[in-house]
Amino acid sequence: DAHLPDAGHELAAPLAHDPMRAATLLAKAEQAAARGEQALALSLAIQSYHAQPSNNALSFAGKQACKLGDGEKARWARMHLMPGERGPVDTACKAAGLALE
C-alpha cells in the first residue's frame, strides 16, 4: 500500500556523493530565496545536502527553515552542523521567534 510521504520523509533521503548536482541545487536554492520563495529554497537546500553533504547546504537550509517557522527542519539542520557552526541558524531562528531548544 502506498504511503504519502510525511514531513520527515524529505529529511530521511539517502545521502549520495554527487558534488556537481549538489552545487547546482544549492545555487538554485539561493536563487529561489532571492525571489522570496523560501519553501522552494529550503527544499532545494535539503536536496543539495543529500546529493553531497555540506555545511553550506545545512546552514542555508536551517536559516530558510527558521524564516518559514519550520522547527522540525531547522532542528534537523542544526543537529547535523558542528556546534561551532550553528550560530547563523540560531541567529535566524531567534530573529524569527522560533525556539530550537
Image (spheres, grey):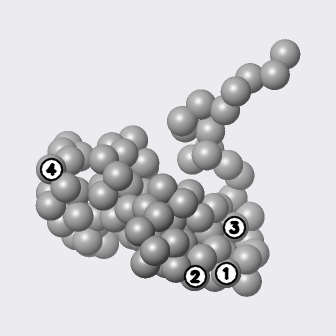
Please identify, in this view, whether the residue under mark 4 or under mark 3 is nearer the observer.
4
Mark 4 or mark 3: whose residue is earlier in sequence? 3
Please identify, in this view, whether the residue under mark 1 or under mark 3 is nearer the observer.
1
Image point 52% across, 79% down: which residue?
31
Q: CA distance from mark 1 to mark 3?
A: 10 Å
| Disc number placed over residue 24 in the picture, else none | 1
Mark 1 or mark 3: whose residue is earlier in sequence? 1
72 and 43: which is toward the camera: 43
| Disc number placed over residue 51 in the picture, else none | 3
Horizontal side of 60 relative to 99 (left or right) equals right
Q: Are marks 1 and 4 in contact (CB under 8 Å)?
A: no
* Label 4 Cα crowd, 10 Å radius (few <14 / some 14-19 / many 20+): few
Image point 74% across, 23% down: which residue?
3
Q: CA distance from mark 3 to mark 2?
A: 13 Å
Q: Are marks 1 and 3 in contact (CB under 8 Å)?
A: no
Kindly tell me whether residue 87 is visible in this rendering: yes
Image point 71% across, 52% down: which residue?
14
Secondary structure type for disc 3: helix
* Label 2 Cα crowd, 10 Å radius (few <14 / some 14-19 / many 20+): some
Judge whether 28 appears above or below 65 on screen. below
Horizontal side of 15 relative to 91 (left or right) equals right
Q: Are marks 2 and 1 in contact (CB under 8 Å)?
A: yes
